[in-house]
Amino acid sequence: MIEALLDGLSWALLMGGCFFIVTGGVGLLRLPGVYARMHATGVLDTLGAGLFLGGLMVQGGLSMVTAKLFLILVFILFTSPTATYALANALYGAGVRPVGRDGRQCETVDRRGESSKP
Amino acid sequence: MMFAAATIGLVVAMALALIRAYAGPTLYDRILAVNAFGTKTVLMIAVLGFLMGRPEFLDIALLYALINFIGTIAVLKFFRYGDLGRAGGRAEDEEGI
């Protein structure tokens, strides 16, 4: 009984994680502009990895395996937003600005708070 | 069974990331795709450990997560400064990067 319940919970978490990860992959492939792709994959990968590792933790039970999975989860939760932020910062520093759906640049607010329309 | 299904989903997402890494118009697209690919590789190693009944793979997954993050930051720093040993400063202090 309890085994079936845990298996069902694990299925749900793993499939939810897969859904979010595949959605992030589709966004990475389809969205226009680097910033849009970054927001798709940076956000959804973190959530998907959390659900995925949660599903594996349910299968691992109370053991060393779960502890290691928890360590991986904490590390991904810290590093994935950090890497995305570093990439966005490097991108902005290199002079790339967000583009809209039609490929033109959006109105941006620069670091001094002044609005500019290229 | 559930691990096999999860592996298939991961493979699909990794293929999408690889297509973007190959086609990406700019350097930053490729870095982003490789970073996403690395995150998925960590999950893939973890789930393959369960699939094959060898949870020792989790140590490799942990190591891969570390290397993936450091690699991304190192590539970004190299393309920004052209030198890995240089101490980073604030972006406003730099002239004509």
Image (spheres, coloured by chain):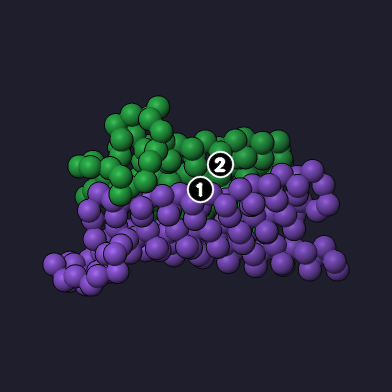
In the image shown, does B63 or B96 lie closer to the viewer? Answer: B96
Q: Would you say the residues marked 1 and 2 are in contact, meaning their CB atoms lie under 8 Å apart? A: yes
Who's the residue at 37% across and 50% down the image?
Answer: A87
Q: Which residue is mark 1?
A: B39
Look at chain B in the picture and name its colour: green
Circle 2 residue: B65
Q: Is residue A112 visible?
A: yes
Chain letter for the residue marked with disc 1 in the picture: B
Is B21 rendered above or below residue B9? Answer: above
Total of numbered circles in the picture?
Answer: 2
Q: Position of residue A43 (x, y in %)?
A: 47, 62
Residue A27, placed above or below residue B59: below
Q: Secondary structure at mark 2?
A: helix
**How busy is the neighbourhood of tag 1: few (under 14 within 10 Å), some, or many (20 plus)?**
many
Gap in angstroms between the C-alphas marked 1 and 2: 7 Å
Q: Is residue B37 visible?
A: no
Quadrant for the N terminus of chain A, please: bottom right
State the residue in front, A77 or B13: A77
Q: Residue at x 50, y 48 (%)?
A: B39
Mark 2: which amino acid? Ala
Q: Which quadrant is home to the C terminus of chain A? A: bottom left
Please give left or right for residue B72 compared with residue A57 in the image: left
Residue A58: give x, y in percent of width and height.
75, 58
Q: Residues within 10 Å of mark 2 (few under 14, many from 20)?
A: many
> Chain A is shown in which shade?
purple
Which chain letter goes with mark 2? B
Badges 1 and 2, same chain: yes
Name the foreground residue: A50 vs B12: A50
Chain-order first, disc 1 or disc 2: 1
Which residue is found at the position 49% from the left and 37% from the top? B70
Rendered residue at 37%/58% (across/down): A38
